[in-house]
Structure formats: structure tokens, C-alpha cells
Amino acid sequence: MQRYFIGFDQTQNDQIWITGEDAHHISRVMRMKEGDHLIAVLPNGSSSQCEILQIEETRIMAKAIGWKQEEKELPIKVAIGSGLPKGDKFEWIIQKGTELGARTFIPFNAARSIVKWDPKKSDKKLIRWEKIAKEAAEQSHRTTIPSIIPPVELEQLLEIGREYRFKVIAYEEEAKNGKSSKFASILGNMSPGDSIIVIFGPEGGLTAEEVSFLENNGFTAVGLGPRILRTETAPLYVLSAISYHFELMR
């Protein structure tokens, strides 16, 4: 059943209303009719099956059948810090990372980033990224939409990292040296409710200087197995490993 995120200002008692692009999606794309059902999700994670009562030109009116809390989120709060990659790779990371449970995405300007952030296009780009995250969250039946922080510099990751108990760098040199047990050890020391930020380099990876800077400020460099992963693949590997460890193994 299709789900849509709504704000607290879009519901009163058992009535909800949906406007904007979501209303267009319901009536024009999904071609729903009065009497059809959808799922509405509030910012606090509560969700309800809703029956469509009325379809207007720009608004959908529906009745909530009963609000409940769903357990759909990763038990670990995961932030993905990604050195800005080329093309649409960051959009791919947002879409697939959202499906796999990431809570926050943090793009940053890395030394080897070919793409440079253009402040003049920042608002338009952020809107697109947020739309991708919202649609992926709806598709994967998340109860929260991941947040996306506007691109930062490497030094700003230190301040952001203070919000997380575990701070990790995915570093290919660790993988080459066969040191792939660090990440498994970190997962073994984590408990549901913990938080982790994982930093990934762009194409070409992070420089030794960037890794040393982060390590000197509380981050731990880890390998992700014996194979070298692409910049858009590595975050998905980490999220899959966390999901396996905390959801499928328990």
C-alpha cells in the first residue's frame, strides 16, 4: 500500500488532508479513487491506514483508521559522510542508503572530489536530494525521512561527529593490509540505540593526510573486506552489514 509523509498540520482528529505533489501523485499517477486506501505517516513515526473520502483539484481528504507505531527503522542511528562524487552517484547513495536505513547524509568537499559545490545551485540541489530521500523512504516503508546536510568541509565533520558515539573512516588501505576485523569489532561493541558516523571518500578515495587528520580527532579507520569498493557501493555495504548484525542476527 502506498504511503505518504504528512505534517502534524495536515491532520485533525481522524481527518487528514494531502496537498501538493503528493496529492497529484495520488490522483494522477496512482489514479486512486474515493474509497481506496493509503498509509499516512506523521513526523513522530506514527502511521495509519487511511480511506480516501474526497479527491479535489489540489487536495485529498481521507480518514485515518487508527494510528500506530511501526518498527521499521534501523536500531542504530547511521550517518553517511560522503566525499562529493561525480555525476549522479550521490543521488544513488541517498536513494539506496535510504532504503537500507541511513538516518543522515553528509556530503563534504574532499581533496580528490572532482565535483565542486556551487553555492548558486545549492537550494535546487538540496531540494532534489530531499525529494529523492522522501520518495525512497515512502517506497521502502520507512517511518522517518533521512536528513541531508548541505555540503561541508572536512574540518566541519569533527563538529558533526561529536553527536555520534562511534566515528569510522572507510579506508581502502586498511582493506589492502588485510585489517578487515576492526569494523566487525566495532559492530560487536555497539548496542541498539547507539549512533555511528561513517566517512567515505570520493572517486580515488581519501588522501593519507585526510585520514590522519580524522584519526587524530577521534575517528577510526577500518577496511571493508578484501575487495576495493566504489564510492557509491561502500556506504551500501556498511548499511547492509549493520542491518544484518542488528536485525537479522537478533
Image (cartoon, rainbow, N blue to C red):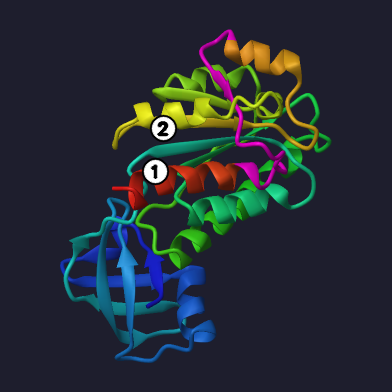
**Image quadrant occupied by the N terminus:** bottom left
Quadrant location of residue 66? bottom left
Magenta-tinted stretch: 216-234
**Numbered badge on residue 98:** none
From the top left corner, tell me how far across and down residue 236 is, in percent.
Answer: 57, 48
| Residue at mark 2 | 187
Q: Characterize the local packing of mark 1: few (<14), some (14-19) or many (20 or more) Cα atoms within 10 angstroms.
A: some
Quadrant location of residue 114? top right
From the top left corner, tell me how far across and down residue 158 is, in percent.
Answer: 54, 17
Residue 118 falls left or right of residue 1: right
Magenta-span inclusion, residue 182: no
Q: Nearer the viewer, residue 6 or 105?
A: 105
Q: Earlier in the sequence, mark 2 or mark 1?
A: 2
Residue sitting at 39 percent across and 58 percent down? Answer: 142
**Is 195 situated above or below 101?**
above
Residue 30 falls left or right of residue 43: right
**Is 41 situated above or below 56?**
above
The local secondary structure at tag 1 comes to helix
From the top left corner, tell me how far across and down residue 176 is, in percent.
Answer: 71, 28
Q: Residue furthest top?
A: 216
Badge 2 amino acid: Leu
Badge 1 amino acid: His
Residue sitting at 37 percent across and 47 percent down? Answer: 74
Discs 2, 1 touching: Cβ within 8 Å: yes
Q: Nearer the viewer, residue 62 or 173?
A: 173
Quadrant location of residue 120? top right
Report, in whole angstroms, how far the alpha carbon at label 2 lies from the one at label 1.
Answer: 7 Å
| Residue at mark 1 | 245
